[in-house]
Each structure stands twice: as structure tokens, then as C-alpha cells.
Image (tube, coloured by chain):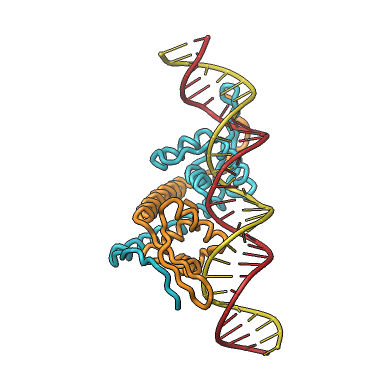
Chain colours: A orange, B cyan, C red, D yellow
Amino acid sequence: MREPTFWILTALAPESRHGYALIQEAERLSGGRVRLQAGTLYAALDRLVDEGLVQPDREEIVRGRARRYYRLTDDGAAALDAEAARLQASVDAANGQLSARRRFGLGPATAGLVIS
Amino acid sequence: MREPTFWILTALAPESRHGYALIQEAERLSGGRVRLQAGTLYAALDRLVDEGLVQPDREEIVRGRARRYYRLTDDGAAALDAEAARLQASVDAANGQLSARRRFGLGPATAGLVIS
DNA sequence: CTCCATATAAAGATGATCTCAATATAGAGG
DNA sequence: CCTCTATATTGAGATCATCTTTATATGGAG
């Protein structure tokens, strides 16, 4: 799962939202780090609907503009949950390896060619 | 940063390794979930050397085959550390949103069209 | 004699994401 | 008035990390 997809599912978890609101919610949740591009978002929503992780919910017309709300399916929530667990395991592995690096220090590069 | 890149840096953190050993180390560290493809690995190593996150270390000739060792640079370690922190924040956000979903429950889909 | 493990490299395909542009309305500021 | 910004979605085209497949080479196991 790529980052934009992850944030779309995360933003949709508690309640249904329309596309534009998702862009703002993803930015808020990520502390400003993630800015979903419109092209990415709508393409991803279509894909996620096909995959059954997201469902179209209701539609509103506001000031002549359609507002399409999407909701996370149970499959979508399970997928996000699994992804979060997977990422947590990755983070733990990286931190463990970085700790090992700090403990042993890292000697200077061993230049040259060894023939065995 | 994509997954294969993340695991290459993670596997290289404590000590220098050659390509083939990286494939096995990434699989071990990820609990068997990640299997680096050879094509992905060597392309990524070239790219990471260009970016200064990884350095060629020593070279060995074993049974007529070259063994090229790579080591993580300080920039590479910093990049991995930053990536781990970023991922941790993402995981926390997702878990928070999933908790909110569980607390409020998620009502049935609101079908229909609202015009305001 | 073939299969498997060890090692690296290169070519071509895939596909999510990115950039850019188009469309539409309303309110704010000059 | 006119332009700029915010709201809201859609489509075309490009990018690029990754994936798949193939080639090359050797030695040990069965």
C-alpha cells in the first residue's frame, strides 16, 4: 500500500467524507506532511471502490457542484489495520538495526579487494 | 521511500553486506514477509549510491563470482531514522482513527441524494 | 546429469502517483 | 469591474520505483 492510499483509508476510518475534505483531513492527520494531489485522490478512490475497501455513500449538490461521499468498508478497515501492524513491525525492525549500529559503532570503510 | 529501499537500508544498518546477503537479511528481518527481487535490489543499490545513502565498501572474489559489499553512510542512517519516525507517526494516526471508528461505530450507508 | 544455492546485471513491463489543465461557482479585495 | 482564492471533480500525459524474466558462472548435492 502506497502512502496516498494509506492516508485516504485513515482519513475515512471514522466517518464518510467527500474527496476535497479527504485532502484536507489527510493533511491535518499527517501534521501537514501529506498533501494529496487531486489526480491521485480520485484515481485512488476509483481503484479502492473496485477493490471493495471503500464504498460510495451519499451525494450532495452544493452550489452547483457535486459532492460525492465515500465510506470505509469493513474490508477497508481490516486492510488499514493490517497495514498499520505491518508498518509497526517494520519500524521496530529498523529501530532495532539502528540501535545495533550505535552499539557497535561503524568502523571505517574496508577499501580494497579480497580474493578468497 | 518504498518498501524494498527501506529494507535495504535497514539490513545494512549494523554492518556492510553484499547484495545476495541483503536479500536473505531483509527476509529474516521482516519475518519472511519481504523477498527482495534481484532486479529491484541492484537497481536500488545503484540509486542509493548516487543519492549518497549507501557506499560501496570492499569487494571479494569467491568461487569466481564477485561479491560487492555495501555500507550505510551517516546520511543513510539519518534517512532511515527519519523514515522510521515518519512511519511511526503514520501508524499512530491510523490507529487513532481506527479507535474512533470503533468508539462511534459506523452507521449504515446513507443512500440517496441531498440537495442543499 | 540435473537441480539448487550462490551472485550480479540488464531489458522490458507494470502501475500508482504526480503534474498540469479544464470546468464551475461564490465571496473577498483592489 | 476584475482578479484571486476556495471549493470540487475529472482527464491526459509523464515519471519512476519496482517487478518479471533472462543471461551468465560455479560448485555441491542427490
Residue located 59% across and 34% down the image: B68
Q: Quadrant of the C terminus of chain A?
A: top right
Residue C22 location, quadrant: bottom right
**Left or right of A56 on screen, residue B70:** right
Residue located 45% across and 55% down the image: A49
Residue A31 in sight here: no
In the displayed structure, A11 sits above or below A101; it is below
**Left or right of B51 on screen, residue A19:** left
In the displayed structure, B95 sits above or below D19; it is below
For the image, the number of numbered tags is: 0
Residue located 52% across and 37% down the image: B37
Percent across and percent down for residue A42 are 52, 60
In the displayed structure, D20 sits above or below B63; it is below
Percent across and percent down for residue C18 are 60, 59
Nearer to us in this view, B6 or C10: C10
Nearer to us in this view, A108 or A50: A50
Residue B48 in sight here: yes
Percent across and percent down for residue A30 are 46, 65
Percent across and percent down for residue B111 are 38, 66
Nearer to us in this view, D20 or B70: D20
Nearer to us in this view, B116 or A69: B116
